Image (cartoon, rainbow, N blue to C red):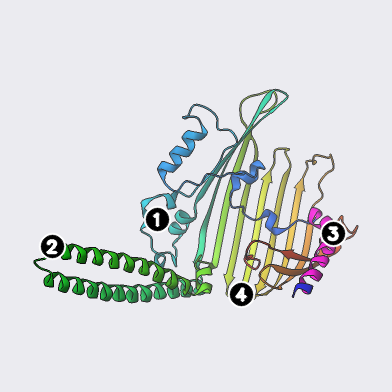
Amino acid sequence: MRQIYITLYIFLIAANAMAQDEKRTVPSIDNIRTPNSPAFTVLGVQPTSIERPSTPADLTLALDNATEGFTSFPKNFAIEVSPYWMGKAARSTTWREDVDRSLEESLMRTLSLSFATTSKTIDEKEMRGLSYGVRCFLFSGKMAKKSVESIESIEKDLSNYSKAFQQANAEELRQLENVMQSEMIEALEDETKQQKILAEYNRRRSELNQENVRRINELEATVDEDAVQQFAPQREGFMLELAYAGAHQNSETDNDLQKRAQAFWVTPSFTMNNVTLLGVFRTQKDSLDQRSQEYGLRLLYGESRFTVSIEYLNGKYMEEENVAGIKLENRERLSVLVEYAVDEHISMYLAFGEDNQNISTGGSIFSNLGIRYNIFKKEGRFKL
């Protein structure tokens, strides 16, 4: 196995070198689908620290700290809020109530608001940026059957463990108390002996509590690991995700914030068993007055180790020029990706297709062979 890893590592270096140009020039559906935090995307920032308050009090405290008591413009601040999960209703919602969602429930439970600011000094001029975004699912399908079965399995195991533990603990405690009461009756007129009996009872009860902790740890270790990994519910069926974001910045001659960029995303999808059909649409105007409309479609089939997907992407870039003064050409790309997971850390992939602006090869046909290596944890490489 070690020799295999060494061989794969050498191949990874070579394949990664071949793939660099294509990674820079070929667009991807993942780049234009609805982002998790639209405000950060449209402002073009990747905050190192994001506030995610879970209660209204946490939200107030975060805003108070960022604005120095609501007296100044927050600098380099990022926050993301899910209103529903901050309220009391969320704490009383059971997982069974979330298997299916109505339109209103889907909107309320998936609504998230993001907000970001930037502040930097250029030639002694403070340049400020502010962005805001909203994201939600109008339709969010239903909880996948495998997720329901996994949660029910965990629920059943924990219930059985709890009953067995309570019964065993109650029986041992009852026996301990019976012994103590019997000895106390025998020592009815001997106060010193009674104190010793009571001290021994407390000592043995403390030992019982420690033993119970050990038993609980053992029981937790026996819970089905696969079921625990599936505990984060996956959803299937038809889903429709929407998002909007806007960004405001001041200019070199004006301190007032003016709208500089905006973007709108639509991501419909349908998932059933191992098949997912995903659509994406994005229209945006960036801070350089560059306007674009991009849309795409992906069909994916995945097993535990193997996945294959077909992807089409079309991008239209209108009138404006990029930073280098070169007009962006419209893009059209059709590709096929095949990926195989060697183990939990390494996956091999093959991508090929046609791109009308594939600069890396000087033509329209492209191919790419490589390896993905994840050193930290398992990848959700087959999930959309």
Residue 324: where, in percent of width, then height?
83, 40
- Considering every residue shown, the one lying at the far right of the view is 362
Q: CA distance from mark 2 to mark 3?
A: 85 Å
Q: Nearer the viewer, residue 345 or 40?
A: 345
Residue for badge 1: 90
Q: Is residue 133 magenta?
A: no
Q: Nearer the viewer, mark 3 or mark 4?
A: 3
Which class describes the residues within 10 Å of circle 4: few (<14), some (14-19), or many (20+)? few
Inter-mark Cα distance, 3 to 4: 32 Å
Q: Is residue 1 above or below residue 281?
A: below
Indicate the position of residue 297 as horizontal and vertical percent values.
Answer: 68, 63
| Identity of the residue drawn at 41% across and 69% down | 214
Amino acid type, callout 3: Ala
Bounds of the magenta span? 4-25
* Residue 57 disc label: none
In 3D space, how far apart are the residues under numbered discs 1 and 2 (Cα atoms)? Answer: 56 Å
